[in-house]
Image (tube, helix red, strand yellow):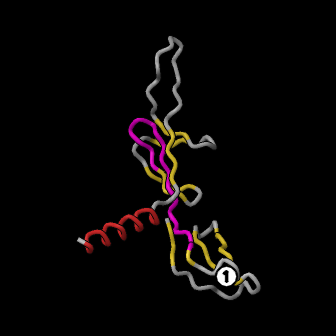
Amino acid sequence: MKCVWIITLAFGICISLCDGSCFHSEPKLELDSNGIPIIPTTCVEKDGTRHDLETTWVSNCMDCSCGTDGSLSCCTNFPTPAGYDKENCKAVFDKNSCSYTVVKKDDPNKACEVTIYVG
């Protein structure tokens, strides 16, 4: 019984650590000239970019998808360092590679050890 409890606890911790940052948005309801709802044919990003239904793409280091109903879902596609010496080191995000490096605050040319990543 103790083993089952330990496994359950470890699984719960793993799930909470692996939950990346995501957002979901429903399509904006548009009406035709008669006031009848128009069925969405695309998903629209905040910047106005349109994507066909049932497609996936990468935008700003996020994996995004357009549902069959025009709903938009995006989740981060990179792990975030969490286990490192935050007093002496800092995490630096590179938008080009969609990844973090953790370096010494006083010498950014030296890497720091990271023991835990989340996301």
Task: Indicate the secondary structure of the residue bearing disc 1.
Answer: strand
**Residue shown at the point (71%, 87%) measured from the top left:** 109
- Answer with the quarter of the image where residue 11 lies: bottom left
Q: What amino acid is at disc 1?
A: Val
Image x and y of residue 41, in percent:
45, 33
Q: Is residue 57 above or below residue 80?
A: above
48 is within the stretch colored magenta: no
The residue positioned 63% from the left and 79% from the top of the image is 102
Task: Looking at this view, name the residue that lies furthest to the right.
Answer: 106
**Magenta-span inclusion, residue 71:** yes
User: Which quadrant is the N terminus positioned in?
Assistant: bottom left
Quick one: label 1, few (<14), some, or many (20+) residues within 10 Å? many
- Name the residue carrying label 1: 103
Residue at left offset 32%, top offset 72%: 6
Image height check: is 90 above or below 43? below
What segment carries the magenta color? 65-82
Q: Nearer the viewer, residue 68 or 4?
A: 4
List x then y, in percent, for residue 80. 55, 69
Residue 70 figure quarter: top left
In-image side of 10 versus 117 (left or right): left
Outermost residue toward the front in this view: 2
State the residue in front, 76 or 116: 116
Q: Position of residue 20 (x, y in %)?
A: 49, 60
Q: Tell me if 35 is positioned left or right of 8 in this view.
A: right
Picture coordinates of residue 34 (x, y %)? 50, 11
Q: Along the line of sight, which residue is nearer the eye, 13 or 42?
A: 13
User: In this image, 3 relative to 84: left or right?
Assistant: left
For the point 74% across and 87% down, the residue is: 107
